[in-house]
Every structure is written in C-alpha cells, then in structure tokens.
Image: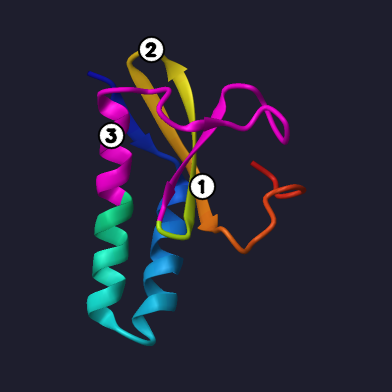
Amino acid sequence: MAEIIWSLQSVEDLKNIYRFIEHDSKINAVRVISGIRKSTQLLKQNVVIGKELSQICKAEYRQLVHQRFLIIYRVKAPDLVEIITMHHSSQNLIGRKI
C-alpha cells in the first residue's frame, strides 16, 4: 500500500478551493474537499490509476479527476505518491509551473 504525501502547493490549493466554494455553500465546500481527499486515497491501492501527463510535463506526473477538479500527482516510488497541485478543469494547465 502506497503512502500519500501532500505538497505545500496542494494543501494551499485545497484551502483555496474550499474558500471559493464556501462563498456559495459551506456544505458543498466540505463535500468537494472530502471527495477530493477520498479520490486521492485510491492511489494507495494503485499508484498509476491516473492519466499520464507526459504530453505537457514530466513523464512521472499523472492526474486524477474529481468532479471538475484535476488532481496532479507524481509517483516518487512504487510505494510513495506526492500530490503536487490541483485546479479546476476550466483552467489551462499548459504553462502552469508544476
């Protein structure tokens, strides 16, 4: 079973997503953040479950999708995954520093 670590950027992204959604509904904000965190738990069983992002960044980077949010992660070892960042799918990932 793989260990999951969160980068400082990914933690900040979670906070920003929560704050943005909270303006409309605190309940929905909690649901989205809980869903994102639950989606990342899938990586414990299968680190390569996400789509490869080799066409736009380094080959070891992959993405999971939760609702409209893209969760960018990298497999650091067969038993270690780092959540790098996350953003809304309407945002352009190309050109974003990862």
Residue placed at 25% from the left, 47% from the top? 38
Q: Which residue is mark 2?
A: 78
Q: Which residue is mark 3?
A: 42
- Residue kind at label 2, given as amino acid type: Pro
Marks 2 & 1, CB-CB < 8 Å contact? no
The residue segment tinted magenta is: 37-66
Residue placed at 67% from the left, 50% from the top? 93
How is the structure coloured here?
A: rainbow
Mark 2 and mark 3 lie on one chain; the one further toward the N terminus is 3
Q: Is residue 54 left or right of residue 33?
A: right
Residue placed at 71% from the left, 50% from the top? 96
Q: Secondary structure at mark 3?
A: helix
Q: How many marks?
A: 3
Among the 4 quarters of the image, the one containing residue 44: top left
Q: Which residue is mark 1?
A: 85
Residues packed near mark 1 inside 10 Å, few (<14), some (14 to 19) or many (20 plus): many
- Residue kind at label 1, given as amino acid type: Thr
- Residue kind at label 3, given as amino acid type: Leu
Marks 2 & 3, CB-CB < 8 Å contact? no
Residue 15 at x, y percent in the picture = 39, 64
Relative height, residue 33 to residue 9 (above, below): below
Relative height, residue 83 to residue 29 (above, below): above
